[in-house]
Image (tube, helix red, strand yellow):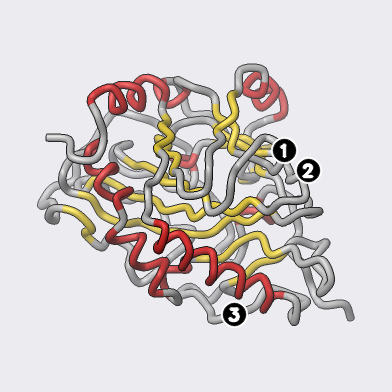
Amino acid sequence: MATALTADQIDAFNRDGFLVVEDAVTPAQLAALKADLAGWVEESRAHDEPFGPETVDGRARFDMGAEHTAEHPALRRVNNPSDISPAYLDVMTQARTVDMIADLIGPDVKFHHCKINVKLPGTKTEVGYHQDFAFTPHTNDDVITALLMLDDVTEENGCLMVVPGTHRGPMHSLFENGVFVGKMRPETEAEMKARQVAVTGPAGAVCLMHTRLAHGSAANASQRPRGLYICVYTAADAVPIARNPMANPNEGKIVRGQESPVARMIPIEVELPKQPKSASFFTVQGQESRRAQA
């Protein structure tokens, strides 16, 4: 029985592949998340290349765009902030968003990975069209990405753009000439952009997105920041069939219900990702990270 979403909301998610719900976290939870992120942005000013406590697979925790400077920081990604922040761990495990996930994919839910995607004013970060399932394929597609809005999100500051209903369609290749580029071919992306809709909302809202929904986003063209805390959850019986691109010590943690003794399979074909272990999502898509000058 649903506890956090209405029947109409569940129907809308199943039809469209996404759902926006306001007030997904408490004001205190949101304030704590924003405070930690603001501190990390300030800390990034002192660095001229990716930095921070390494992730479990040896990558820098914090990634900046090539345009990053101390005066105009371009922090764009925090890898698995729940590893280093009690506030982010609390929301990942205890927030109302997790109850919403359980309403959509069943009572038994496990965690896969999380990150913060940031678009600060004046930065160039954008996201080419893709489907998350191509990065994180599982034995079934009961996999949901929860994108919590840390700021008011508008079209001007680089909101998520989605194509409703594409979660019920085919998987699109993220390869070009045999190389995994992490985004759809230009002609496919053009088709998607012709049908895209904007996902906007106030700080504290969450967008629940099906793993196969086609989506992307443009750069921030405003003077306001746009931060998203992104957590990926799966049904307990969804078993990964590729390496986690954002490995973390909480991968597979049951956050609602109980473990599954079986792996549930569905008939679906997906190209296996070939993302270099040391690469970030943005560098795979061709957006270089900031590097120290020789």
What SS does tag 3 mark?
A: loop
Q: CA distance from mark 2 to mark 3?
A: 28 Å
Q: CA distance from mark 3 to mark 1?
A: 30 Å
Look at 63% across and 33% down and name the residue there.
Answer: 184
> Residue 250 vs residue 236: left or right?
right
143, above or below 196, in the image: below
Q: Which residue is mark 1?
A: 156
Residues at discs 1 and 2 in contact (Cβ within 8 Å): yes
223, above or below 130, in the image: below
Splitting the image into 4 quarters, where does residue 27 fall? bottom left
Name the foreground residue: 193 vs 294: 193
101, above or below 165, in the image: below
Q: Quadrant of the C terminus?
A: bottom right
Q: Which mark is residue 221?
A: 2
| Location of residue 127 in the rendering, given as x and y in whole percent from the top left corner | 65, 43
What SS does tag 2 mark?
A: loop
